[in-house]
Structure formats: C-alpha cells, structure tokens
Image (cartoon, rainbow, N blue to C red):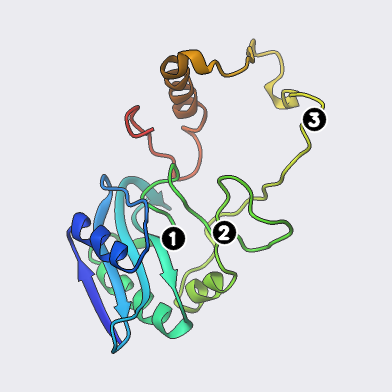
Amino acid sequence: MRFAVNKDVKSFRQYLQFFNRTEWIDDEYWILGASVESANGELLAYGVLYFNNGHQVNNLSASCLGNFYASNSEAATILLNRIFEISVKIAPVIIGPINGSTWSSYRFITEFHTEPFYLEPANPPEYNRYFKASGFTDLSGYCSSVINNAGGFLPSSHIGNLDYAFKNFDADTFDDEIKKIHLISNTAFKNNFLFTEINYNKF
C-alpha cells in the first residue's frame, strides 16, 4: 500500500473526483489531504486534516480529521497512524471525525435504531472501530431522534417566557430570511462544544 499527502486543496479535490468521489472540503481550515492506495492504484482510504483555532480540548489546541473514508481496517490503520504523526506537529490533540467545523459534517453514529435522517451522518459501523483501534476515545456524545410533528410546532418548555416569536419561512424574501437564521444560529450555538462562528457567505 502507498500513503500519500497532498497539500493543495484544488488538486486533492481533483484527485477524489478521479475516483468518482465528491467531498465538501472546507478551504478555510484545510491543512492537507491524505490517501492510501493499493499497489494497482485503487483508492483504499482517505481523509483531510484541518486546523481550526476555535477548537480546544482541555485548553489544548486541536487539529481535526474529517472527510474520512476507508474500505478496510488495514488501510484505515495506515491512514490514521500516519495522520497522527503529522497532526502532532500541528497541535497536541486531534479530534475526529469533523470536516473543519461543526457547521459541516462531524461525528460518527454509534448506535443505529432508525435509518439516518436529514443532516445526520451515515457512517458504516466499522468506522467507530477503526478510530478506536488507532487510539481515539469518545470525546462527546448525544442522542438525536425524529418526532411526529403532524400536530404542529410546540416550543420546548426550556424557552419559557423569553418573548420569542415563531413564524413560517417566507421564500419570497429568501435572502432576508437566511440572514436572520444566520444571526440566530451564531447566537444560539455560541456556547456549544467546539463552536466556531460562521460568516454569512459560507453559511
């Protein structure tokens, strides 16, 4: 197997496209792309190493590994071990999977009770084993679920009497509505773990 590093985001995108893989890669936090190929040029694993100044774990800066793909455990081990060797020169901690920030795809599903729904990750179960076998440990976790909203929207009880107003999205004033959602999102999520502010154009 052959391990390779690509430090140019444009050429790494083209590299993935050659294998019919299209990935959202966050240019803002990009450090490098890494891949593992078989002797006959088959793409076996790849990932992107990012650095986001807003990511800290126990007051230590952290790089992050995202856009992870692996076809088997051997290729995953090679990729992850080599990424560790590179990432320790950038920051003392590495977290993953996270594609640059929590505004993009991040985390693995560890328990599957339903089919993945909108905006939920859809990783193969073995990805969790690959990461843990290479030294990753659980950093944070949560539970998400789907609810039946046929009866209409009801604000959750923790909102209380904080003078919030709720209305339907107005597609006729799309840009204005998105600007409001951008402001609300940056404000509402600012205390969340691993939060970094997102600018309007990127949002």
Location of the N terminus (image quadrant): bottom left
Instruction: Give the side of residue 179 with respect to residue 192, left or right.
Output: left
Disc 1 residue crowd, few under 14, some 14–19, many 20+, Cα 10 Å: many
- Which residue in the protein does label 3 denote? 150
- Outermost residue, right side: 151
Q: Residue at x 55, y 70 (%)?
A: 128
| Figure check: 162 above or below 113 | above
Which numbered circle lies on residue 86? none
Q: Which of 104 and 143 is in front in this view?
A: 104
x and y percentages locating residue 147 in the rendered image: 76, 39
- Which residue in the protein does label 2 denote? 122
Instruction: Quote the CA–CA distance across marks 3 and 2.
Output: 26 Å
Work out whether mark 1 precedes mark 2 in sequence or the reverse, and give the earlier one: 1
Instruction: Quote the CA–CA distance across marks 1 and 3.
Output: 36 Å
x and y percentages locating residue 129 in the rendered image: 55, 75
Mark whose residue sits in front, 1 or 2: 2
SS assignment at label 2: loop
Q: What residue type is labelled 3?
A: Ala
Disc 3 residue crowd, few under 14, some 14–19, many 20+, Cα 10 Å: few
Q: Which of 76 and 94 is in front in this view?
A: 76
x and y percentages locating residue 60 in the rendered image: 35, 54
Q: Residue at x 26, y 58 (%)?
A: 13
Work out whether mark 1 precedes mark 3 in sequence or the reverse, and give the earlier one: 1
